[in-house]
Image (spheres, rainbow, N blue to C red):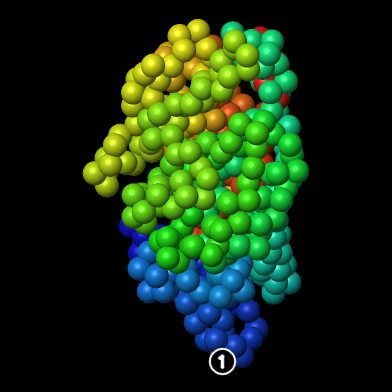
Amino acid sequence: MRVIVFGLLLSIVILNWLWPLPLPITVKLLVSVFVIVASQYQFWSRLSSGSVFAPEFPRPLIILFNWAIGTILFLTLLQLALDLGALIVALVAWQPIRIGTDARVAVGGLAGLLAAIGVANALRVPLVRDVTVAIRGLSPQFDGYRLLQLSDLHITRLFSAKWAARVVERANAASADLIVVTGDFIDGSVEMRRADVAPLAALHAPDGLLAAPGNHEYFFDYAAWMRHLSALGFDMLENHHKVITRETAHLVIAGLTDRSAFRYGEMEPDIDIALAGAPTHAPVVLLDHQPGDARTAAVRGVALQLSGHTHGGMIRGLDRLVARGNNGFVSGRYQVGGMTLYVSNGTGLWPGFALRLGVPAEITRFHLRAG
């Protein structure tokens, strides 16, 4: 199936867009080779590291690959739109319509520009987004509590130590009471990413650092990453909870393992185990990387679920497809029964498709209010 899809993309870009242009045959051949090489980005990534998720190339080359992939995608869509428009005009006028060179150059330039903007948006260190959530049963002693969420950092050669340090600086400056991470810290093994994740050790908040694993942690020796992240100061909530206390009031922060855990022989998510022994009447904030099981959490009495995984769909329009794979949840706030679900757009992005258009990355600061 993947071969068929790539074959269609390449045939549209090379045969339907490039070849009719009045260029020397050598230029057309060179551009065709570039397009074919760029389209195999995941194959080259696997050769570089053993995994399509961790391209071990110099950062500028990863940026170039992402720009090229984006350009191919947008050019395919724009050329199809151009062809469809020409077909409609031809049918109405009942005479053949030739797509001119200017139109082809225009859609090529627009595709390259959109891809460049998308990559630039993806690489930007996100701003802090403020969200106020009313929590039923929250004690007045917790009214105004500030909880900061990072998600989907995907620390790699693309989102490297320098980027991570700037995220840490911005997160610490938000002056949150508690910092949580909802999974997908990395792409790569501990040895590959040791220096890149080192800045995360500088994160600090009065009530500590809590986190739940994402599916990408399971791709690269899950147990080793749990040990390393714990050593960096994160309390990894693998079907477990912590109780935050203010005098006589309590707030429960629970975390689940990821839905993909069973494929790797690891502990599957279990909300009953996670909440076992928690104070009965204390409101619960649940960290669950994937938002798809939010309705189960709502039935279980969770007040606020924080998730990520979807990257917000990355591109406006594509988000509708991503939502379909996550039970309708893709970006922002949802009311699920009596529970608020918030799906982060992500702080970073998977380096295999690092583009954002209309879906900005985020560091999210929640202001909890007694509801």
Left or right: where 175 falls relative to 179: right
* Image quadrant where residue 333 sits: top right
In this rendered view, identify the residue nearer to me: 47 or 66: 47
Quick one: label 1, few (<14), some, or many (20+) residues within 10 Å? few
Residue 222 at x, y percent in the picture: 35, 50
Residue 132 at x, y percent in the picture: 71, 23
Give the residue drawn at x 49%, y 31%. 287
Residue 161 at x, y percent in the picture: 60, 62
Instruction: Examine the rendering and report whether any part of residue 85 can be seen.
Output: no
According to the image, label 1 marks what residue? 26
Left or right: where 209 falls relative to 117: left
Residue placed furthest toward the front: 247
Give the residue drawn at x 61%, y 31%. 207
Give the residue drawn at x 30%, y 34%. 268
In this rendered view, identify the residue nearer to me: 64 or 305: 305
Residue 224 at x, y percent in the picture: 36, 54
Left or right: where 129 falls relative to 26: right
Secondary structure under the numbered disc 1 in the rendered image: helix
Q: Where is the C terminus found, in terms of image quarters?
A: top right
Residue placed furthest toward the left: 265
Give the residue drawn at x 70%, y 72%. 105
Q: Where is the N terminus found, in terms of image quarters?
A: bottom left
Give the amino acid type for the residue marked by disc 1 in the picture: Thr
In this rendered view, identify the residue nearer to me: 342 or 173: 173
* Image quadrant where residue 158 sits: bottom right
Q: Is residue 245 above or below residue 309?
A: above
How many numbered marks does the figure carry? 1
